[in-house]
Each structure stands twice: as structure tokens, then as C-alpha cells.
Image: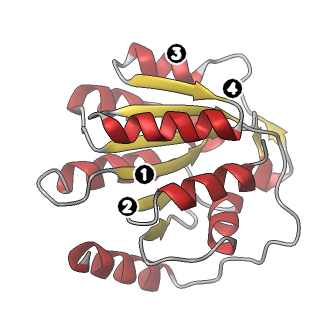
Amino acid sequence: MKRIEALSCLATRSAKLPVVATCAATSRELASLGDRDNYLYLLDSMGLTSSVGVGLALALVHSAHDRVVVIDGDGSLLMNLGSLATIGFLRPEKIILVVLDNASYASTGGIPTYSPGIDLGRIAAACDITVLRCNDLVGLEEAFDKALEMAGPYVLHVTIEPGNAANIPLLLMDPVTISTRFARWLVES
């Protein structure tokens, strides 16, 4: 499964949920599928996606928002493994952390990550987080739907192919505009 296919599946299932997306190719590909006000693209913030997602899930604990979808990559999560310990300790029930694991820093030329030798799902499970694994669209749909049914926290460890989708435009939105419209969407939805 390619990242853009996984993102398309997640976009369909999260149209009414707050979504926090990691930087670079992941944000660009997600935006290319249809930019939405409920997307918070973390441009130039590699490694911080899971931490921002935890804070948002905790802030929205008494809100009408059912879940917070956090889309991260293996490289980004490896830069901040401590966020898994934070999720395990604080237990934000609304968080669904989707780790798109392509075993590479795809946005910077496909440099390999440590994920083939370090099982990110096992690390999350060791932090007492429910882990669901998949490597195809049907499995991703089933895992995401399961994570919507019961309180989390969840990590969806999704194995995807290396590489980026072709001909995806740069995401040149002002980060202030992105965060302002996202905050407005949170209040109005």
C-alpha cells in the first residue's frame, strides 16, 4: 500500500474529526486529496506530531469531538519516542495515532530509518497502548473502524511502501493560517 492510498482511506474516515498530520510529503499528499479545515498540518515540525496530538486529545476530553486522528511517520516518531511513554502514562482516550511506516525518511531522499530493526508497535505496546497492525487498505479500514468503536489510546502501526506520490504540489500555506482555521473549525464543529 502506498502512503497516498493510506491517506485517502484515512481522509474518508476522518472527515468530521480533528486530524494532525506530520510534515513534508505526508502533509502535502493529504492536502492534495482535498484540503480541509479540520486538518492541522505541522509544517517544519518533524517529531512533534504525536506530542501535539496528545495535547489536543487531552484538551478535547470533554468536547463533542469523538477522536483525534494523528498521522505520523516512522521517521518522525523515532525522533520523539518519548511521546509514546507520554501517551501510555496519560492515557488520552480519544487519540488514534496512525504511524505510516515506510522504513525511510521518504521526504529527504529515502534514507532508511531504524524501523526495520526496532518494532514501533512493540514499543507502543510496552507503553500500555493498544496496537493494531495492518499492511493493506482492508486492514487499515478495519483497524481504524475498531479504534473508533472503543476508547483508546490506540496506535495503528501501518506498513506502507517506501516513496512519495508523484507530482504532488508543495504545501505553501502560512502556518498561522493553518492553525487559525483549525482552531476556528474546532470551536464551530
- 3 vs 4, front mark: 3
Task: First in sequence, mark 4 or 1: give its number.
Answer: 1
In the image, residue 5 lies at what x, y percent?
73, 52
* Residue 115 marker: 4
Q: Quadrant of the C terminus?
A: bottom left
User: What is the image's colouring?
Assistant: secondary structure
The residues tagged by marks 3 and 2 sit, at their Cα atoms, a distance apart of: 27 Å
- Taking 170 as reference, is 90 left or right? left
Residue that carries the numbered disc 2 in the rendered image: 17
Q: Nearer the viewer, residue 125 or 139?
A: 139
Q: CA distance from mark 4 to mark 1?
A: 22 Å
Classify residue 170 by image quadrant. bottom right
Residue 69 - label: 1
Around disc 3, counting alpha carbons within 10 Å, would you say few (fewer than 14), some (14 to 19), or many (20 or more)? few
Which numbered disc covers residue 122? 3
User: Label 3's element?
Assistant: helix
Picture residue at 63% right of the left edge, 29% below the top: 134
* Residue at the limit of the structure toward the left, as seen here: 62
